[in-house]
Image (cartoon, rainbow, N blue to C red):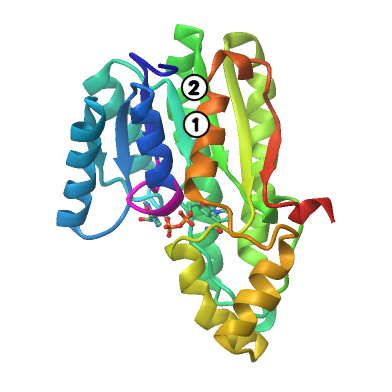
Amino acid sequence: MTLKSRTAVVTGSTSGIGLAIARAFAAEGANIVINGLGDADAIETERAKIEKDFGVLCSYSAANMLKADEIHGMITDAEAKFGSVDVLVNNAGIQFVSPIESFPADKWDQIIAINLTAAFHAIQAAVPGMRSRKWGRIINTASAHSKVASPFKSAYVSAKHGLDGLTKTVALEVAKDGVTANCISPGYVWTPLVEKQIPETMEARHMTKEQVMNDVLLAAQPTKQFVTVEQVAGLCVFLCSDAAANITGANLSIDGGWTAE
Ligand code: NAD
């Protein structure tokens, strides 16, 4: 078990990619802190299921990724409860699709805050402990949109490009301390985040749902398949293994060939 006796905090893990990563880490023996928004009963069901399915401890942090103090609190609470935060996955993210002229300023601020600034706060809180223990893994869920752009996603593309820069900078700062920092960059993964942007894209591009699915989403992916959450989680588990100890400052694509074009 790659992560026996480790603790992993995964932000935005009440659904989609984050939940799959949390469950994959638990399968490798890690204690888990899940985080995110959503229905309290549904979150408690997922939390209890992780403990039952994998025989690890799992707690829930309600920290809002818009709030620096709550993000710092999430890390200090996890350290107090489990003794350490060894793996940090900054995964919480939101999307909004609109032409630049009408892109709402408040949506810009929220996307930059949740998709980029929250990672800065969580990393700042977690790095001292990782450094002192000479082991740590920081994984930032970026996107193919950290490497290339698409129209109408100005805030998201900016935040994800920023996350790539933050990751490289942190990787250099902690390089001698047994701590790695990497981005993972999925293409389109079938999750609620992708499902929700279909109506906005239909409006922005004047398309039907089928046209958005085939001509916008899967058009970008040469494999013509959505990436699965399990495939993304598998990459995260690998990045926590000893084999990945010298992979740092990287931005690893898992996008069906999208960014090769
Ligand atoms: P999702 O909507 O299923 O999950 C997003 C998670 O973030 C949820 O748990 C949600 O509660 C949480 N979240 C949102 N706002 C929050 C806040 N203010 N505070 C705390 N948590 C908050 O989406 P997903 O597709 O699983 O996305 C996860 C990550 O993967 C995001 O960073 C996204 O940008 C990235 N990503 C997704 C895709 C894709 O195709 N789905 C592709 C590339 C990158």
In the picture, which quadrant includes the N terminus? top left
Quarter occupied by residue 235: top right
Q: Amino acid at mark 1?
A: Ile
Along the line of sight, which residue is nearer the eye, 41 or 163? 41
Q: Is residue 67 left or right of residue 175?
A: left
- x, y percentage for residue 217? 64, 69
Label 1 environment density (alpha carbons within 10 Å; few <14, some 14–19, many ≥20)? many
Main secondary structure of the magenta stretch: loop
Label 2 environment density (alpha carbons within 10 Å; few <14, some 14–19, many ≥20)? many
From what the image shows, is residue 54 above or below residue 179? below
Q: Is residue 59 magenta?
A: no
Along the line of sight, which residue is nearer the eye, 228 or 93? 228
Tag 1–tag 2 contact (CB < 8 Å): yes
Q: Secondary structure at mark 2?
A: helix
Quarter occupied by residue 218: bottom right
Cα separation between marks 1 and 2: 6 Å
Q: Secondary structure at mark 1?
A: helix
In the picture, which quadrant includes the C terminus? bottom right
From what the image shows, is residue 151 above or below residue 94? below
From what the image shows, is residue 138 above or below residue 64? above
Q: Is residue 62 left or right of residue 118?
A: left
- x, y percentage for residue 16? 42, 53
Q: Amino acid at mark 2?
A: Val
Q: Is residue 15 magenta?
A: yes
Point 58% across, 53% down: residue: 227
> Which residue does the numbered mark 1 point to in the structure image?
123
- x, y percentage for residue 208? 59, 89
- x, y percentage for residue 234? 52, 35
> Which residue does the numbered mark 2 point to in the structure image?
127
* Residue 98 visible somewhere in the drawing: no
Which residues fall within the magenta stretch? Answer: 11-17
Q: Residue at the far left: name it.
A: 41
